[in-house]
Image (spheres, rainbow, N blue to C red):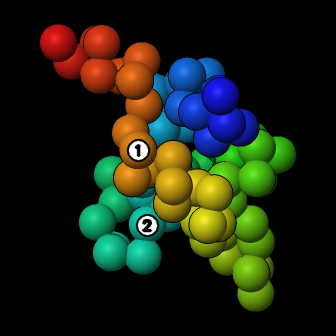
Amino acid sequence: MTMTANLDDHLTLDQWNALKALRPSGVASGNPGRYMIEALIALELAAMVDGHPVITEQGRRVVLRGSPRLWDLAA
């Protein structure tokens, strides 16, 4: 099992929404707070660039894969 798969299973709904809000598409579900950004940075799903949070390559992979735990909640 990959590290990305492990992260998929452990993201909270708030972390998931914050990660999606960082996507470059501009489609944000709100402005993630500092605490949430720091949590995503600690997971290496986001980074600070020029003082702004951005999604990392690993964060993009997590968003593209989706969260299996969230799939279960939606079913």
Badge 1 amino acid: Arg
**Label 1 neighbour load within 10 Å: few <14, some 14-19, many 20+:** few
Q: Is residue 54 above or below residue 37?
A: below
In the displayed structure image, the side of residue 10 where residue 69 appears, left or right: left
Residue shown at the point (74%, 66%) measured from the top left: 47
Q: Secondary structure at mark 1?
A: helix
Q: Which mark is residue 23?
A: 2
Badge 2 amino acid: Arg
Residue shown at the point (58%, 55%) measured from the top left: 59
The quarter holding residue 51 reads bottom right
Where is the N terminus found, in terms of image quarters? top right
Residue 60 in the image, given as x and y percentages of width and height: 51, 60
Residue 38 in the image, given as x and y percentages of width and height: 77, 48
Judged from this view, the residue extending furthest toward the left is 75
Judged from this view, the residue extending furthest toward the right is 42
In the displayed structure image, the side of residue 53 where residue 71 appears, left or right: left
Q: Which residue is mark 1?
A: 65
Residue shown at the point (39%, 52%) measured from the top left: 64
Q: Is residue 64 above or below residue 74?
A: below
Q: Is residue 17 visible?
A: no
N-term mark: 2 or 1: 2
Q: Secondary structure at mark 2?
A: loop
